[in-house]
């Protein structure tokens, strides 16, 4: 069965109470984000940064250093343990433990005793690890700064609050799914009917 075309999606969104202009924006943004996700999955920027900076680490190892170092930023607070690494990277605790051990063995991180609970082992960056994380962040900021430097100041002033606001759109997914429960149920029924028709074909 062929996929719905743009006009059919527009009609579907219109029936759900979403105006045409917003529908057009939704579909264009979705296309942009899909392309963005593909490039993010390939980790193009991270791979290039490690190569250009001559850092002999895999991306998974660098991710561990980033998580360990995140507690010193304004966005992440608190001590970092192996379980913290596993949670923030969405990986199995045994894999997190193995990656942390690799970083400790290579001298990028060290184990220490928690200041809050002496029975707890935490993970910290060494000076070498901090230098690596800072260098990659600086690389990323320079590349992004070079791109955004071509924008007008008024564009930057408008863009930042909008992308900050857009970054919160998934927070309201529950309210949206409740609002469009009937439409979602109809989509689910169509899927079930499609599956049955394939079984009987």
Image (cartoon, rainbow, N blue to C red):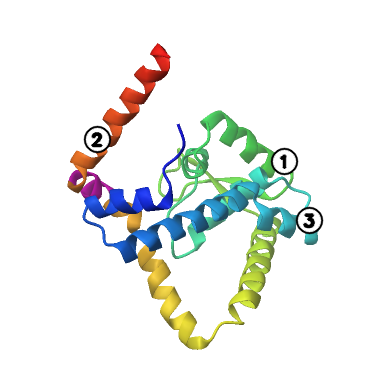
The earlier-in-sequence mark between 3 and 2 is 3
Residue 41 picture location, percent across and down: 60, 47
Residue 30 picture location, percent across and down: 45, 54
The earlier-in-sequence mark between 1 and 2 is 1
C-alpha distance separating marks 3 and 1: 21 Å
Q: Secondary structure at mark 2?
A: helix
Residue position marked by numbered label 1 in the rendering = 105
Q: Is residue 20 magenta?
A: no
C-alpha distance separating marks 3 and 2: 49 Å
> Which residue does the image show at 34% across and 59% down from the upper left?
23
Q: Nearer the viewer, residue 39 or 125?
A: 39
Which of discs 1 and 2 lies nearer the camera? The answer is 2
Locate residue 184 relative to residue 68 in the image: left or right: left
Residue position marked by numbered label 3 in the rendering = 51
Q: Is residue 177 magenta?
A: yes
The chief SS type of the magenta part is helix
Residue position marked by numbered label 2 in the rendering = 186
Q: 10 Å neighbourhood of mark 1: few (<14), some, or many (≥20)?
A: few
């Amino acid at each position: 069965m062929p996929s719905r075309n743009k006009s059919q999606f527009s009609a579907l969104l219109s029936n759900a109470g979403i105006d045409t202009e917003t529908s057009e924006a939704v579909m264009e943004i979705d296309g942009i984000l899909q392309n963005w996700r593909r490039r993010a999955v390939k980790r193009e920027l991270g791979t290039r940064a490690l190569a250009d900076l001559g850092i002999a680490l895999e991306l998974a190892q660098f991710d561990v250093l980033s998580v360990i170092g995140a507690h010193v930023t304004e966005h992440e607070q608190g001590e970092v343990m192996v379980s913290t690494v596993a949670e923030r990277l969405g990986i199995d605790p045994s894999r997190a433990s193995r990656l942390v051990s690799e970083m400790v063995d290579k001298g990028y991180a060290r184990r220490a005793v928690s200041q809050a609970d002496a029975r707890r082992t935490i993970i910290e960056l060494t000076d070498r690890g901090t230098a690596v994380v800072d260098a990659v962040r600086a690389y990323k900021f320079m590349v992004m700064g070079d791109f955004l430097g071509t924008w007008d100041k008024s564009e930057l002033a408008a863009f930042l609050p909008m992308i900050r606001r857009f970054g919160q759109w998934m927070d309201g997914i529950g309210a949206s799914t409740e609002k469009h429960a009937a439409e979602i149920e109809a989509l689910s029924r169509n899927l079930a009917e499609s599956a049955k028709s394939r079984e009987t074909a």
